[in-house]
Image (spheres, grey):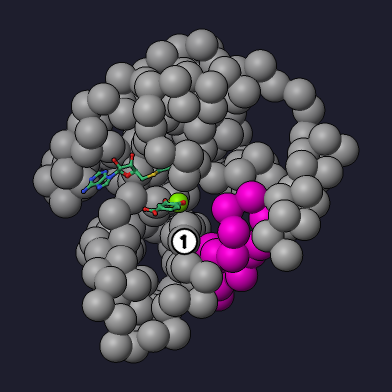
């Protein structure tokens, strides 16, 4: 099945996504630099872009930059004057992302902040950069519950919180899992279920990234 999922993703890419040198080069450079091939797929990138456009996002916060592939899709959805802040722990990843974002002509609207996100998030709050309209949480999975709490804290009514990798080939069903990532995702569901300030769902996905899923949570309010 996996091969068919990938072939269909390629079909979707070829039929629906415009050929794009900056995005292709971002993946090439990431690979050349030895970064893991865990960026969102092209169809998922377009989904992020469309969601950002649909809600008219002006301020976007990403947790987990890697080589900047998802950041390019998201930043391109920003209107004039919009900003994306993306948090990355590895200076080496941030360096690759900086080059990729520059090539895509997005350096003026994207800021990469290096360090563990649990240290850089409180600074964002202190600097008065919130509220953000859209969050894309895609970093270390054990911290997902904390990242979700921060997103709610830095949101406004109507903000959209997206969380990647919330199915993990069905691994999230294993309550006894010794995998800290699985436990992080399981606790994220606990938080979502208990949090009255959001309406949420999770969509399972198959494709180039295997069998996984995306949480979509809307902060309740006007
Ligand atoms: N969003 C990217 C993929 C991110 S991969 C895309 O789709 O293109 C996950 C990234 O999170 C990696 O680059 C990893 O270095 C980073 N990361 C891991 N732990 C982190 C932490 N504690 N704080 C910030 N970033 C972290
Ligand atoms: C992993 C992380 C991701 O963000 C992803 O999209 C796929 C895999 C990982 O750490 O294995
Ligand atoms: Mg991911």
Decide: is 56 above or below 199.
Answer: above
Q: Quadrant of ligand 1?
A: top left
Task: Where is residue 72? Give x, y as percent.
Answer: 53, 29
Decide: is 74 above or below 195.
Answer: above
Please state which of residues 208 and 98 is positioned toward the viewer in this rendering: 208
The residue sitting at 69% across, 45% down in the picture is: 43
Task: Where is residue 23? Give x, y as percent.
Answer: 60, 24
Q: Is residue 99 left or right of residue 94?
A: right
Q: Which residues are magenta?
A: 201-216
The residue sitting at 16% across, 37% down in the picture is: 115
Which residue occupies the extreme right position in the image?
15
Q: Which is the main secondary structure of the residues drawn in magenta?
A: strand
Q: Could you say which quadrant of the image residue 154 lies in?
A: bottom left
- Residue 210 is covered by the magenta coloring: yes
- CB at disc 1 and ligand 3 closer than 8 Å: yes
Task: Where is residue 73? Give x, y as percent.
Answer: 57, 34
The residue sitting at 34% across, 46% down in the picture is: 63
Q: Residues within 10 Å of mark 1 (few under 14, many from 20)?
A: many
Residue 148 seen: yes
Please state which of residues 111 and 92 is positioned toward the viewer in this rendering: 92
Task: Where is residue 69? Give x, y as percent.
Answer: 50, 32
Which image quadrant: the N terminus? bottom right
Decide: is 140 above or below 185.
Answer: above
Q: Is residue 1 left or right of residue 11?
A: left
Please state which of residues 35 and 158 is positioned toward the viewer in this rendering: 35
- Residue 160 is covered by the magenta coloring: no
Residue 97 seen: no
Decide: is 211 above or below 129.
Answer: below
User: Element type at marker 1?
Assistant: loop
Q: Which residue is mark 1?
A: 165
């Amino acid at each position: 099945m996996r091969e068919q999922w990938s072939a269909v993703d390629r079909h979707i890419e070829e039929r629906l996504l415009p050929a794009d040198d900056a995005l292709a080069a971002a993946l090439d450079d990431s690979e050349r630099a030895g970064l893991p091939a865990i960026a969102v797929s092209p169809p998922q990138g377009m989904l992020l872009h469309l969601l950002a456009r649909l809600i008219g996002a002006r301020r976007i916060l990403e947790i987990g930059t890697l080589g900047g592939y998802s950041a390019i899709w998201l930043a391109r959805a920003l209107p004039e004057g919009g900003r994306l802040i993306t948090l990355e722990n590895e200076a080496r990843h941030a360096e690759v992302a900086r080059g990729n974002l520059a090539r895509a002509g997005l350096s003026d609207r994207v800021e990469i902040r290096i360090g563990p996100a649990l240290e850089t998030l409180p600074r964002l709050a202190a600097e008065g950069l919130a509220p953000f309209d859209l969050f894309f949480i895609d970093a270390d999975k054990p911290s997902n519950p904390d990242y979700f709490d921060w997103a709610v804290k830095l949101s406004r009514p109507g903000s959209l919180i997206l969380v990647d990798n919330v199915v993990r080939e069905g691994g999230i069903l294993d309550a006894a899992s010794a995998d800290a990532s699985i436990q992080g995702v399981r606790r994220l569901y606990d938080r979502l279920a208990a949090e009255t300030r959001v309406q949420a769902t999770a969509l399972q996905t198959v494709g180039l990234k295997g069998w996984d899923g995306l949480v979509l949570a809307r902060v309740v309010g006007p």
